[in-house]
Image: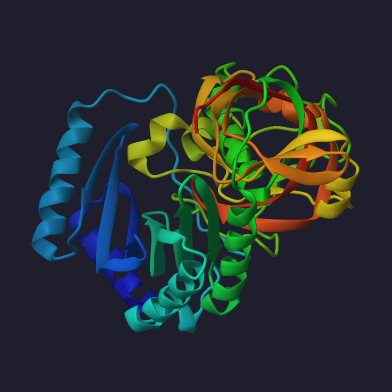
Amino acid sequence: MKDINSGKELVDKIKSFTKNYDFELIASREKSELTRFAESYIHQNVAETDLNLTVKIVNEDRIGAVQMNSIDEPAISENIEKAIEVTRITPKLDYHYRLLTPQSYKMKSKYSKDTANFSPLNRAQLVKQLIKEVNKRWYEVAGAFKTEESTLLVANSEGVFAFDRGTKVDFNCVITRDNSTAHASFVDSDINNFSINKITDELLETALKNVEQIEINPGVYTVILSPEAVAEILNYTGYTAFNGKMIMENKSFVTSNRGKKIFPETITVSDDPFDKLSLPLPFDLVGYPREKIYLIKDGVVKDGVYDHLTALKYNKKCTGNTLSPEHASFGALPFNLVMKEGDSSVEEMISSTKKGIYVSRFHYVNILNPMSVQLTGMTRDGTFLIENGKLGRAIKNMRFNASVVDILKAVDMISKERQTKEGFIGSTVAPYLRSNNFIFSSKTSF
């Protein structure tokens, strides 16, 4: 399934085996190449091409689904027969299941030939350059560098046919010397946007400051969160608060706050595949076209995102956020979380802070209370005290216990700069934030 024509051939093949039952299919092909490195040397280089085909049979509101990694006719025939058998014994849905009708799509995923053709030697050369520079400062490097090319096909017996192709670069690493560490990550579709020199400079700048950490007492602090940290809390907020199924089941703060202005006017969060920094997904996994959905607009809570099943069950509009059948019971997730930029520079945010903490990154985050999006976790790889408008001493990592709702309510500065980070599904675009209500609950020993 390398191109649109082979995709059409696959759909015709599925039709020939479904015995006039309604069906939906998801076919994906991913070619990925990965270079791993640790202790300042490359220790693994792997390449994988993976094909996955999911076929869902619909029989009078009974659904059976099968997955396979072969598109040979015998495999397809055998597995579809199993799916048909499942529909004869599985309970009926408590609502009428309708297939999507043919749609038009406004965008495509970003694709780069240079990314698709980037070789193991190319990756090794960049990693070697990074290792050489940080070794000069006696730091060790560990991380992973992946490039991938993917195709996705979604189709059904009503005539939906959605085909897309994209590329991705995913790089992350940590440098370490004793207890001094720094972390960097990069995600994009185009390898030409990747700068190993910029990554190296950022790592060393943070690591060389992150030495001789001091202890501070737990408490409520003003914090400046990096885009990496902001993306982390936004991802968990999308996972819980803006999941349409959880909203309809009264398990989200959105349920009782739709239409209410509970955040500052500067806070706007959307699921936006059209943002220039997003890595867009043009359709969801039943073929709904993706669109921009406001989750919070000018401080006002709008709504969440809805998958096909939840939309049918609760008479809502699907927003193009349907997951694969094996995750259908979960509900929906934002595919392209985006937070609107502000009008401040990072330097202005720091210089106007009398006392606070700068957080480079969060680690080991878990959900304590989904209703308030209360999270716990630890800081990592560079946490610094801000005193009298200056970024000062490194501090030992702190455990936090904070509600994202409360954090966002107390935001008073947002940066112009935004960065693209990894999301739970697609990408997350996040700025720097300053919030005056962040609870550090305890110290750590490192």
Write the residue at 63% across / 39% down.
234
Q: Nearer the viewer, residue 127 or 277?
A: 127
Quadrant into which the N terminus falls: bottom left
**Relative image position of residue 98 (x, y in whole percent):** 45, 40
Q: Nearer the viewer, residue 338 or 333?
A: 338
Write the residue at 23% across / 49% down.
67
Indicate left or right for 88 with 247 as reference: left
Instruction: Identify the coloring.
Output: rainbow
Q: Nearer the viewer, residue 7 or 442?
A: 442
Q: Is the residue 253 above or below the residue 203 in the image? A: above
Write the residue at 70% across / 32% down.
303
Indicate left or right for 363 with 220 as reference: left
**Relative image position of residue 13 (x, y in whole percent):** 23, 65
Q: Is the residue 296 above or below the residue 122 in the image? A: above
Indicate left or right for 411 with 22 as reference: right
Q: Is the residue 254 above or below the residue 157 in the image? A: above
Q: Is residue 279 visible?
A: no
Indicate left or right for 221 with 52 as reference: right
Write the residue at 46% across / 77% down.
129
| Quarter of image, res 407 | top right
**Relative image position of residue 84 (x, y in whole percent):** 19, 41
Q: Is residue 136 visible?
A: yes
Q: Nearer the viewer, residue 307 or 123?
A: 123
| Quarter of image, res 393 | top right
Report the number of discs: 0
**Relative image position of residue 436 (x, y in whole percent):** 81, 29
